[in-house]
Amino acid sequence: MAHHQREHSVETIRRNSEVMGALRKLMVVNRGEIAIRVFRTAHELSMRTVAIFSHEDRLSMHRYKADESYQIAEVGECTPVGAYLSQDRIVQIAKERGVSMIHPGYGFLSENADFARKVQAAGITFIGPDPDVIDSLGDKTKARAIAMECGVPVVPGTPGPVSDYTDAQAFVKEYGLPIIIKAAMGGGGRGMRVVREEADLEDAFSRAKSEALAAFGDGTVFIERFLDKPRHIEVQLLADRAGNVVHLFERDCSVQRRHQKVVEIAPAKNLDNTVREAILNDAVKIAKFVKYKNAGTAEFLVDTQNRHYFIEVNPRIQVEHTITEEITGIDIVAAQIQIAAGALLPQLGLAQQRIRQRGFAIQCRITTEDPELNFQPDTGKIEVYRSSGGNGVRLDGGAGYAGAIITPHYDSLLVKCTCSGSTYEVARRKIVRALVEFRIRGVKTNIPFLQRLLTHDTFMNGNCWTTFIDDTPDLFRLVQYQNRAQRLLGYLGNVVVNGSQIKGQVGEPSYKHEIEVPQLVANGQPVDVTTPPTEGWRKILVDQGPEAFAKAVRAYPGVLIMDTTWRDAHQSLLATRVRTVDLLRIAPATAHALNNAFSLECWGGATFDVAMRFLYEDPWDRLIALRKAVPNVPFQMLLRGANAVGYTSYPDNVVYDFCEKAVKAGMDVFRIFDSLNYVENMKLGIDAVKKAGGVVEASVCYTGDVSNPKKTKYDLKYYLDLTQELVDQGIHILGIKDMAGLLKPEAAKLLIGSIRERFPDLPIHVHTHDTAGTGVASMMAAAAAGADVIDVAIDSMSGMTSQPAMGALVAGLEQTNLGTGIRMEDVQALNSYWEQCRMLYSCFEANVKSADSGVYDHEMPGGQYTNLMFQAQQLGLGTQWKQIKKAYEEANLLCGDLVKVTPSSKVVGDFAQFMVSNNLSGADVREKAKSLSFPTSVVEFFQGYLGQPYGGFPEPLRSDIIRNQPRIDGRPGASLPALDLVKLKEELMEQYGKSVRDYDVISAALYPKVFAEYRDIVSQYGDLSKVPTRYFLCKPEIGEEFQVEIEEGKTLIIKLLAVGPINNTGKRDVYFELNGEARVVGITDTNAAVEHVTREKANSSKPGDVPAPMSGVVVEVRAKAGTHIKAGDPVCVLSAMKMETIVSAPVSGLVEEVPIAEGDSLSSGDLVARIVKDSE
């Protein structure tokens, strides 16, 4: 049985179908895709194949596609490119391994006549022209002479090689500019330079010679007159030893960059038939004249007057031979091998009259280059590789697979994608489709550029020229790829390796299951919540406007509620960490259950910056999404007067623009307040909201105790006078904002009753915190005294530092004439969701277990209470919480007994922590104020940056704290110049692309640093708002499968498979399964102590720091430490994938250090030199 199995092996199949006789073993002296391409045809001819490889290519795919493979040289013996140029070593390997034929591919030794002679001398068949023909045609200067002898037109150029710069000068003097300098040997864009200015001639000449020597082992160059906007047309030739020559028609290779072909088309579209025939005939004429044998390509330029000029003959296979194969059906590589073995064209059925072309074919070269960085070659590990396919799609690849390492040593070609169709347009559409199907992650590719190119009108019409890419900057409006799945895995992998990085999180959630969304029931039947209700208070607002809305609220016979669960409740209990995804899950049910609610507080205040800062979400996206889910209940937000949703004053136009955008995104009611009750600050917010079309709810911040005659600063008269000032501003609704929970039942009765008596038509909206435990009683009293709206939170999110319980208020008012219109069973249904949700966010609980009636003494706002407790723990003051509360009382008095709400509450809190950490009493502060270094917030408060406190600033403390710093004695933002939002948008678009919205501009205006950091996170990980909270906050279990819906109809199924060990760079590989495919992400383990060599990065804020513009190898260092350099002078020369780049000095000055040497490998951004800039 075993013998039977051996007989049916690949080898026996080949032996039974031999067509090559004694020539049975073929070596490809090349690498990558062309090596694999030749192997495939050789296998079809029943030949055994041999690969060679450099040490750097030891993991390259081409060595595994061959039957045998051998390393060319030991480590360190050759450079990566030099290995493939080691003629003697390669021939020795071929002889030792019994190789019959050698195919050189393209590049490397493919046009080296000496190598061909050595192969033949070793008794091995060289697949290509005779060495003498390679000499005559491979050298472009000799080829020109041959063409001229044949009567074929050529571009004016030097009669022979140019080795001296003075010869180049002489040519320019005779023929003028522009000119092109070309390597006499080789092609592919290396060793080519176009010179348009005489000042650039010497450097371009030197660089062309250097590149030619590095790429081809021969630094000889020649010079031609440069033609503007020509087409590049080439003819595929096949010839045999008997002098038979056929052409396989032409290819249009005009789409180039740096003389490197990017897209090729066969046949050439829009080429005049007379010109086509002339080119084909001239190509055959030259081949016959030199007695050409094997495959070759004659290349021509066609100018705008339809005149054609011979350029050269490439005596080898071309990269783009695939498109000719697709339109003719002829395997050019098979023909090469068989011609080299002695076959004649007629024996192969290759007579000119029998060769036909059908349709069109287009080839794109997909490379690992970043078109947004001037096609800088990218290196690294391919993390994801999913290719295209289907009818008419051909792929020729060499390094395209997941896990492949892309190095800077070789060409950046990843895969060639060739598509054929019956017409040019069919082929074009097919290749556009094919490129869309590719998914390549881990390295940048030129696919976005190719897609833009293929859909440009000029390309679609088939009218490109050789400098089309350089002449068309519009091509760089690239197709944007989101790369969502791989970036998301990067975040999940980071959580797996390093744990959650969300600030304020302690441990993991106590609830790690899917949260069950409740089913609402009405009249014994389930309510369909998939269709949002249309009835609700927002309908009145939308249909009739803010004034009519306010009148309707005032006329309502009962008491309306505002639910704070979506903002203040989770700010007070869970550090504002509840995410949009969890709000959206309950939103449809909420829209039905609370359709008679006055509003849902869901935005503004701390939620705005926290969304970006800690949750990596866009606050505008949250508002827009919630608005779509709940169209019937008004939304309410917190607006800090002139501070908008920030903690400082902004230019007036920013506040106006913010309010306008908020209304546009779906906001309705604006609770406008000032942390000091400073009406001048509030006026700006009131006017901005009015102009935006929102409901103006101007709020009085409550402090003190109006029912206590001993508390005289903030007495009843103070609040009535303040209300009058606000009413005079034309507000729609009055808010009473009791942020610390100081409003006792008797005080509520007195305050609300007095306001109602003075202002009978004014809607009153009361807000409190339940810190002391009297919240429900106080709100019941407020309702009885004439309040129209009271704030509550869903039961499981209520109490303590949050708002009073919704269920308690609804039930308490249900049997009175002040009913809320909310059903208790609906409250309980929503409560079941939030009970689970609170456990999901348990890792943000402040561990406040009970009410604290001490709030009547320290007067700390509910939201601040929990936040300050957390901050104290982070500062190492957690055990001194009692002292901090006491110090908070003292700090408040030092500030003059303030109204305390963000940001004034932050001032008092910072002051208190400063006092405790420095062991200072109030008396100590007064005594030492002139010498103490106070927190910035405290200093800025005393300067007047928050506005003017009621009763003024305490002196001499104010003067002692601010000393010589400026004082502000009016509205802080009044003197601020308008912010140029148009210019800001332009700057953001330059940084983040054209996807920047007007909403983003306002976010950046309010929180520039936070917005930039948020965008950095999005750039790294993508849109994290879609990730279920369970996996956003903690890692999944090994083998656990979960889903992430990244958009409607697109769901990622993810499973964590394994976590690898730490490697020598301090990273761990994290293995996932994504939609059934294996994915790997490398994550730096921040807990690992790893030593590895790192290069200093250039500091972008220092103009004299010179960064490496790309990854590459230093081939020459020009600058020296201690010398003076001028801006624009070369610092060094970098080579990446055979393309040299000069790194120039950005400024003039003294070179302080040059921390590089020839041969060093650099990464993009590494410090190349440090220059001390000359003084102006």
Image (cartoon, helix red, strand yellow):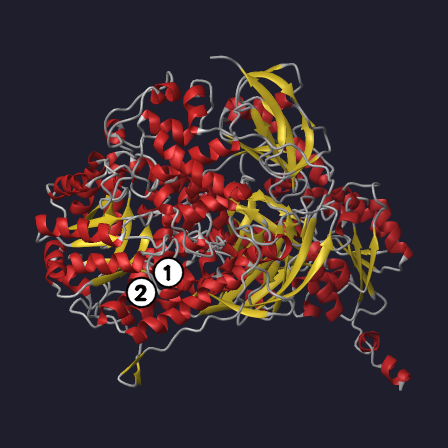
In this picture, residue 1051 sits left or right of residue 654 = right
What residue lies at 47% left-to-right and 50% top-to-bottom? 1018
Please name whichever residue, 801 or 920, is drawn nearer the observer in this view of the structure. 920
Q: CA distance from mark 1 to mark 2?
A: 8 Å
Mark 1 vs 2, N-terminal side: 1
In this picture, residue 120 sits left or right of residue 931 = right
Q: Which secondary structure, mark 1?
A: loop
In this picture, residue 214 sits left or right of residue 721 = right
Vertical placement of residue 637 versus 1041, above or below: above
As drawn, which residue projects farthest toward the top? 1175
Residue carrying label 2: 806
Vertical placement of residue 1099 versus 377, above or below: above
Image coords of residue 373 (percent x, y): 52, 41
Image coords of residue 922 (percent x, y): 42, 28
On the question of residue 669 being in view, the answer is no
Image coords of residue 771 (percent x, y): 37, 52
Residue contact at pointers 1 and 2, CB within 8 angstroms:
yes
What residue lies at 39% left-to-right and 61% top-to-bottom? 797
Q: Quadrant of the N terminus?
A: bottom right
In this picture, residue 394 sits left or right of residue 744 = right
Vertical placement of residue 800 versus 327, above or below: above
| Amino acid at the residue labelled 1 | Ser
| Amino acid at the residue labelled 2 | Met
Q: Which mark is residue 68?
A: none
Please name whichever residue, 317 or 242, is drawn nearer the observer in this view of the structure. 317
On the question of residue 3 being in view, the answer is yes
Vertical placement of residue 426 versus 943, above or below: below
Q: Residues within 10 Å of mark 1 (few under 14, many from 20)?
A: many
What residue lies at 86% left-to-right and 55% top-to-bottom? 94
Residue 874: quadrant of the picture: top right
Residue carrying label 1: 798
Q: Which secondary structure, mark 2?
A: helix
